[in-house]
Image (cartoon, grey):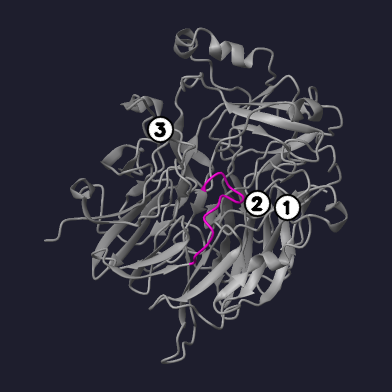
């Protein structure tokens, strides 16, 4: 079965989508994941006057050279309750004055600072919740939640930072209590939960590429007040859980508030690069899945990759949008993906808005025991961000200065397009697990239905290694590169970026771009190189672009704000053509989603500059906030 298409029986009314106030109350700005701000003070005409009004350093940073693992800080600042809240990679919450950066309070989870499931200490922020009918004088009518890598969810009073004693055990829920099948690692809470009504929707992250059989994917609905389990969704069929695992939701989620539908980006099953032990269908894996917020009932699911052996996790919350197509309003969502496709689906039914077709994909080269899907779904529009059939040409300069390393690395390797099978001789992967589009997703201007998304254009090589040979090898892994065991499978693997030993990319640029789409028509409006690559303290030409992690936001004033690039710059972009209107350097790559908010009549733009070793070795603990000069 290719997709579950159980549709809603009732005729449903159109929903308000983008936030209409100037708060930034969720990871994606609003529950529709638009990353849109109605603030209009900052415009293309005046953004060049933007200035830093304050910065704050958390102190929670590590380069990994000592006993504390390296930190990766990708937190979106949350503006709610007239306060700016951030979570840190040391699992602390800090509440700040939004105009001055003065600390109001902080809370320390006292979590163990160990890289239990990830190559580094990670945090993507906090969750804000408030009671619909607050009890006067009672504590914790407004709450902030933060998760930890060791699977604890903490709830504190948003006004004071004191633990909410009625939540779980003294303010803490141990989510790992529900990790009962194949519990190879804790259910790490790195992405903040999604709050809706009196519920918290909780996904989790595991330890990628380590085990063949691991914790099966789940999403939990918890009572926002007590932490009690309301319901859970399971993504792996029970009869297959002795042979596989994951297909979890480690990214953010979105909610159609009017319809009461939760949209889940579901990842790939384990082991990620070999499927011979899980050949039966796992229909919910690598999908976007819609569930009823009250019951957890699956309403529909659209699988984006069949029998995924490429780690093409669905890796960002789908953005909800009402489209105007052929004179009719279509309630839709747009799902960004690692494999470079934008899937535009009817959000009531899961059916494609612009069409989707099954195409035959390569079968030769698969390892013994593998049973590939004969076809994969391709969207007919919008056009992809990457070429499906060809990877970028080899850089003759990089090959020359490396004395032929580039050519030698891929000699004898296979490449037959997007779905080239993982192989023993080695396969070129483009786009690979590095993307494509990454976990930040894109930004929607609901006034125009233009959608903006940044992508990395990184060529990778993947080689499966028979178990006996792998077990005799020496070496390790870094941050999503190197050797990985897939314990329990007949193959481990080696994944590398196609780069010289000195760190030069072996493919021609651009290495990253920013794109704009018209979602009403499915048309690509423009694509431009984004960011500047850096090496040895030098900047590459702007036309080369940069690999990037994080996402844009867009405002009613007509400005796109984005960090994301490896050059540690934050930028304002013109939505008309992608040109840079303003930029500033921060202390490390801002691998996070910015936040835009208004406080006391002034519009602010906030970035966290935390870094990620996937892009560059720089790490930081800087929260930096910009605004126009006061008159």
Residue identified by numbered label 3:
528
Position of 266 relative to 571 (above/below): below
* Residue 587 in the image, given as x and y percentages of width and height: 31, 43
Mark 1 Cα shell of 10 Å, populated few (<14), some (14-19), many (≥20): some
Q: Can residue 132 be seen in the rendering of this structure?
A: yes
Image quadrant in which you'd find residue 489: top right
Q: CA distance from mark 1 to mark 2?
A: 9 Å
Q: Earlier in the sequence, mark 1 or mark 2?
A: 1
Q: Can residue 7 be seen in the rendering of this structure?
A: no
Q: Residue furthest left?
A: 631
Position of 328 relative to 63 (above/below): below
Q: Could you tell me which residue is drawn at 34 percent across and 39 percent down? A: 568
The residue tagged with tag 2: helix, strand or loop?
Answer: loop
The residue tagged with tag 3: helix, strand or loop?
Answer: strand
Position of 102 relative to 434 (above/below): below
Q: CA distance from mark 1 to mark 3?
A: 43 Å
Q: Earlier in the sequence, mark 3 or mark 2?
A: 2
Indicate left or right for 29 with 349 as reference: left
Mark 1 touches mark 3? (CB < 8 Å): no
Mark 2 Cα shell of 10 Å, populated few (<14), some (14-19), many (≥20): many
Indicate left or right for 587 with 126 as reference: left
Q: Earlier in the sequence, mark 1 or mark 3?
A: 1
Residue identified by numbered label 1:
184
Nearest the viewer among 303 and 285 is: 285
Which numbered disc, 1 or 3, marks the residue closer to the eye? 1
Mark 1 touches mark 2? (CB < 8 Å): yes
Q: Could you tell me which residue is drawn at 70 percent across and 68 percent down? A: 177
Residue identified by numbered label 2:
206
The residue tagged with tag 1: helix, strand or loop?
Answer: loop
Instruction: Reply yes or no: does residue 378 show up in magenta.
Output: no
Mark 3 Cα shell of 10 Å, populated few (<14), some (14-19), many (≥20): some
């Amino acid at each position: 079965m290719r997709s579950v298409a159980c549709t809603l029986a009732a005729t449903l009314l159109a929903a308000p989508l983008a936030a209409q106030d100037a708060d930034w109350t969720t990871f994606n700005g609003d529950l529709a994941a638009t990353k849109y701000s109605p603030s209009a003070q900052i415009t293309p005409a005046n953004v060049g006057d933007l200035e830093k009004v304050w910065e704050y350093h958390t102190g929670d940073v590590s380069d990994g050279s000592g006993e504390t693992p390296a930190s990766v800080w990708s937190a979106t600042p949350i503006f709610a309750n007239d306060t700016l809240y951030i979570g840190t990679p040391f699992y602390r919450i800090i509440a700040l004055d939004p105009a001055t950066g003065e600390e109001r309070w902080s809370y320390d989870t006292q979590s163990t600072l160990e890289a239990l499931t990830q190559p580094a200490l990670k945090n993507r922020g906090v969750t804000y919740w408030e009671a619909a009918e607050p009890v006067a004088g009672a504590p914790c009518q407004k709450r902030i939640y933060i998760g930890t890598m060791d699977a604890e969810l903490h709830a504190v009073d948003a006004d004071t930072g004191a633990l909410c004693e009625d939540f779980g055990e003294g303010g803490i829920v141990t989510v790992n209590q529900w990790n009962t099948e194949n519990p190879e690692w804790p259910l790490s809470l790195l992405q903040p939960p999604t709050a809706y009504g009196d519920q918290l929707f909780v996904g989790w992250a595991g330890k990628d590429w380590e085990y063949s059989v691991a914790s099966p994917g789940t999403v939990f609905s918890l009572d926002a007040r007590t932490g009690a389990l309301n319901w859970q969704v399971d993504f792996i069929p029970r009869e297959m859980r002795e042979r596989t695992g994951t297909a979890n939701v480690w990214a953010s989620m979105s909610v159609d508030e009017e319809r009461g539908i939760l949209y889940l980006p579901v990842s790939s099953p384990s082991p990620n690069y070999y499927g011979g032990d899980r050949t039966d269908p796992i229909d919910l894996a690598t999908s976007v899945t819609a569930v009823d917020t009250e019951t957890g009932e699956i309403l529909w699911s659209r699988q984006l990759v069949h029998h995924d052996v490429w780690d093409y996790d669905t890796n960002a919350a789908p953005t909800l949008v009402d489209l105007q197509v052929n004179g009719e309003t279509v309630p839709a969502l747009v799902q960004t993906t690692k494999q470079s496709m934008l899937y535009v689906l009817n959000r009531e039914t899961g059916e494609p808005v612009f069409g989707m077709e099954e195409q035959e994909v390569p079968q030769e080269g698969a390892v013994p025991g593998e049973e590939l899907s004969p076809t994969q779904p391709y969207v007919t529009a919008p056009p992809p961000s990457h070429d499906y059939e060809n990877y970028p040409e080899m850089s003759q300069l990089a090959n020359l200065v490396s004395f032929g390393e580039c050519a030698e690395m891929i000699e004898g390797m296979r490449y037959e397009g997007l779905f080239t099978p993982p192989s023993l001789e080695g396969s070129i992967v483009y786009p690979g697990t590095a993307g494509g589009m990454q976990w930040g997703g894109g930004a929607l201007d609901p006034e125009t239905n233009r959608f903006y998304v940044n992508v990395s254009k990184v060529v990778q090589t993947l080689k499966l290694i028979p178990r006996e040979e792998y077990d005799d090898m020496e070496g390790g892994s870094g941050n999503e590169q190197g050797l990985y065991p897939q314990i329990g499978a007949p193959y481990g693997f080696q994944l590398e970026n196609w780069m010289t030993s000195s760190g030069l990319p072996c493919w021609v640029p651009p290495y990253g771009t920013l794109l704009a789409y018209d979602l009403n028509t499915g048309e690509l409006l423009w694509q431009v190189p984004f960011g500047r690559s850096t090496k040895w303290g030098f900047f590459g030409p702007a036309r080369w672009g940069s690999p990037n992690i994080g996402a844009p936001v867009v405002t009613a004033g007509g400005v796109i704000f984005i960090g994301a690039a490896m050059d540690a710059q934050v930028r304002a972009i013109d939505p008309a053509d992608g040109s840079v209107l303003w930029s500033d350097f921060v202390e490390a790559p801002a691998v996070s989603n910015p936040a835009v908010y208004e406080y006391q009549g002034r519009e602010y733009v906030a970035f966290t500059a935390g870094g990620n070793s996937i892009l560059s070795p720089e790490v930081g603990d800087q929260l930096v906030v910009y605004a126009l000069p006061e008159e």
